[in-house]
Image (cartoon, rainbow, N blue to C red):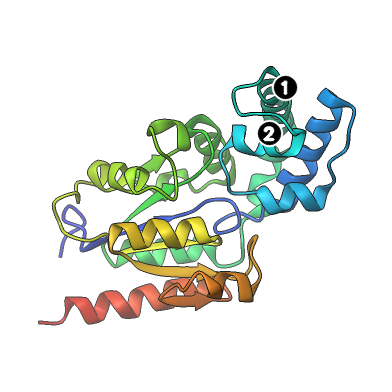
Amino acid sequence: MSAETPSSAVLFDLDGTLLDTPGAIAEQFASAVEAVTGVDPGVAAARRLVGRPLLEMAAGLSGSSTDSVIAQLVSEEYLTRYRELIVPKAADLLFAGVLGGLGRLADADLALAVVTSKKHASAELILESAGIRDAFAAVVGADDVEYPKPHRASGDLALTTLGLAEAGPAGAVVGDTASDIELGDALGAFTVGVTYGVCSTHQIASAAPDHVAHTFDDVVDTLLIRNRKRARP
């Protein structure tokens, strides 16, 4: 099968799946809330919300609503910190095996996309800084759709961008939270839950993915084996 006609799609979450950013995100989000409200919500509380859309995190940590001025100010403060303090370190935050693993998947004619709860511009920025943007034929952020993850809309948009919207169920969805597994289930995709991100092994297993992976190499090996089996006549 040629690269022009990929055999299937793999939709990746970003934070906690490709990049070891949850700790830094939690730290800077807690600092952003304190800068705006004067109250430190704590890094632990912030980490529990990593993976949710920006305004949801801001509202949850500041005790406000998503349409409040406080949530907007917290979001803006966090985005400044994100651009200045997290993005420049992106290359050092790649999980082991990601660079080579993405290449192995591409060599198997799998079409790769990122589907994230981040805003599109923020996702593009950190993928470029990490040096892996070119590995993905599509990037879908929370602001690209009316209903972000776990709703299937973001996955559908990714598949449409990849040219695989009419190819049946998505090949696979890989992520570190229940939201990612729910997205995969909504798409009828094979789901891989990783244990090295936000959720513990027990938490991700409780979301009932088709496979639980402890390393990115495990993710890649599982997807390649599955793809070879699907390609057999």
- As drawn, the label of residue 58 is 2
Front residue (pair 63, 44): 63
Q: Are marks 1 and 2 in contact (CB under 8 Å)?
A: yes
- As drawn, the label of residue 179 is none
Residue 13 location in percent, x, y?
Answer: 49, 53
Q: Amino acid at mark 1?
A: Ile
Relative placement, left or right, of 168 versus 60 is left
Dot 2 surroundings within 10 Å: few (below 14), some, or many (20 or more)?
Answer: many
Q: Is residue 17 above or below residue 29?
A: below
Mark 1 vs mark 2, CA separation in Å: 8 Å
> Mark 1 sits on what residue?
70
State which quarter of the image contains the N terminus.
bottom left
Q: Is residue 209 above or below residue 12?
A: below
* Residue at figure coordinates x 15%, y 57% from the top left: 167
Name the residue furthest top: 69
* Residue at figure coordinates x 42%, y 59% from the top left: 182
Q: Amino acid at mark 2?
A: Ala
Relative placement, left or right, of 26 versus 8 is right
Q: Earlier in the sequence, mark 1 or mark 2?
A: 2
* Residue at figure coordinates x 61%, y 32% from the top left: 55
Dot 1 surroundings within 10 Å: few (below 14), some, or many (20 or more)?
Answer: many
